[in-house]
Image: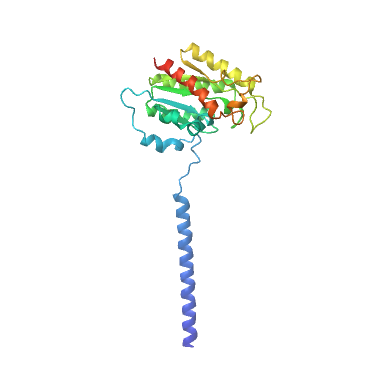
Amino acid sequence: MKKLFKNRRFSVLIMLLFVIGNAHAQTTNKDTVKSKEDFSDDWAALSHYAKENETLPPPTEGENRVVFLGSSIFERWKDADPAFFNNHAYIDRGISGQIAPQLLIRFRQDVIGLKPKAVIILAGSNDIAANKGHITYERIMDNIQSMAELATLHGIKVILCKYLPIYDYPWRKGLQPANKIIALNKLIEAYAIANHFTILDYFTPLVDERNGQKAELTTDGVHPNVAGYKVMEKVTEKAIQEALQ
């Protein structure tokens, strides 16, 4: 009888230990889940460059710091030809896939906060590609104008880009973006002229007979290869000199 009682006590003890252990594991798991940072509200990916911005020192006296704000065209540039950025006071703040309103949201953190002398704004192609929905020229220009106005307010020279030619998007075929890019570039150029901003023409030196990119200068008809970036570097340097003179 005593032996049976002891066995029951032992069984109860084991069950209690199992329940307590399981409860502790569940609590720990819940705590772990809760401790993970939630970035679902970071639609514009402010977290992408947040740490780099924190460690970036302020510009030195006489430094001609320039921020490149855009999407994948700019983000891939620093990997294709890092020397172009390393040998100058150029800061790449491109994020692949972003549309104009996302650039606007990032403008304070990734441009104004870095205290550059000039900003190069390349926007509109992903909007046309309908990456995030259907967007009009008016909405694209609203965002570009807001960025330009913010830059001007903070004493930052504005360089607006005529977008690179694109005949077709590999990931969204059939949108016929060539003429849409041309139409957007006309709006950007007209706005830049009216407000005395520098125009950086990426379209003309890269365009082929179909109003797409020259085959020898691109990887996929949208993004330049190293040779394409070398062409872009020449016109970029010229535009920066013009803006800062």
Quadrant placement of the C terminus = top left
Name which residue lies at 40% across and 28% down.
87
Tell me if I can see residue 74 in this picture.
yes
Q: Residue furthest bottom?
A: 1
Q: Residue furthest right?
A: 174
Residue 208: image quadrant is: top right
Residue drawn at x 61%, y 23% as measured from the top left: 214
Left or right, 25 with respect to 116, comes to right
In this view, the residue farthest toward the left is 61
Give the residue at x 47% y 63%: 23
Task: Count all numbered tags in the image, as a single digit.
Answer: 0
Report the side of 182 relative to 60 (left or right). Answer: right
What colour scheme governs how the chains and residues are painted in the rendered image of this protein? rainbow
137 and 166: which is toward the camera = 166
Q: Position of residue 193 (x, y in %)?
A: 50, 12
Residue 145 visible in rendering: no
Q: Tell me where residue 66 appears, x and y as whole percent.
A: 41, 24
Residue 181 at x, y = what percent? 60, 21
The one of 22 and 148 positioned closer to us in this rendering: 148
Residue 43 to residue 125: above or below: below
Q: Which of the two residues, 7 or 230, is positioned nearer the viewer here?
A: 230
Q: Position of residue 186 (x, y in %)?
A: 57, 15
Residue in view at x 47 percent, y 27 percent = 69
Q: Along the horizontal axis of the image, is 64 left or right of 2? A: left
